[in-house]
Amino acid sequence: MTFVRRYGDSPLHLLLLLCSFALTGYAGVRLLRGDWFGIVLWFVGAAVLHDLVLLPLYGLADRALRRVVPAPASYVNHVRVPAFVSGLLLLVWFPLIAGTQRRRYERATGLSADVFLSRWLLITAGLFAVSALWWCVRTAVWWARTRRGAGS
């Protein structure tokens, strides 16, 4: 039997997969060398918080949006995607956005931590603006195709 038949893909794929596992293992060892209990607690807490609290809230918000905006799912995605990216950024950078880790960040980097809230708000506004612009372009293209199809 050939390698591709037994493995299901090329040897290069297996090599890249093994390299990614090695890199992940190395990063995990380096990460856990410091405050391993705090990191494990953060991961478990994040998983529990996400699965038991945030995921049901996502579902409720999505259902409410779908009821308020009677549009196809592809158009609702113009709200879903920027909201998801903004929420993800908030989740990752929350301690600095909320200002709870300001001193620790400033001691470690020598930089001011006062910019995180304003930058997160600007990024969120930019994400929604780009999404709205993309929605306008899609709607204009659809409108032009519909008018062209109705005129012929």
Image (cartoon, rainbow, N blue to C red):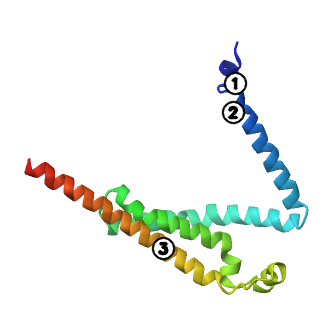
Depth check: 120 or 95 in front?
120
**Camera-nearest label, 1 or 3:** 3
Q: How many marks?
A: 3
Q: Quadrant of residue 120?
A: bottom right
Determine whether 31 is above or below 23 in the image.
below
Q: Looking at the image, is mark 2 or mark 1 earlier in the sequence?
A: 1
Q: Looking at the image, is mark 3 or mark 2 earlier in the sequence?
A: 2
For the point 81% across and 65% down, the residue is 39
Going by the picture, which residue comes out furthest to the top? 1
Residue at disc 1, secondary structure? helix
Determine whether 85 is above or below 7 in the image.
below
Measuring from the top left, give residue 144's x and y in whole percent. Answer: 20, 57
Q: Tell me the number on the disc at residue 126.
A: 3
For the point 17% across and 53% down, the residue is 146
In the image, what residue type sits under mark 3?
Answer: Gly
The answer for how far apart the CA atoms under marks 2 and 1 are is: 10 Å
Q: Dot 3: within a 10 Å radius of its alpha carbon, few (fewer than 14), some, or many (20 or more) residues? A: few
Determine whether 130 is above or below 73 in the image.
below
Name the residue carrying label 2: 13
For the point 61% across and 73% down, the residue is 90
Tell me, yes or no, whether the two marked residues, 3 and 2, touch with CB atoms within 8 Å.
no
Going by the picture, which residue comes out furthest to the right? 33
For the point 54% across and 65% down, the residue is 85
Tell me, yes or no, whether the two marked residues, 2 and 1, touch with CB atoms within 8 Å.
yes
In the image, what residue type sits under mark 2?
Answer: His
Q: Quadrant of residue 117?
A: bottom right
Name the residue carrying label 1: 7
In the image, what residue type sits under mark 1?
Answer: Tyr
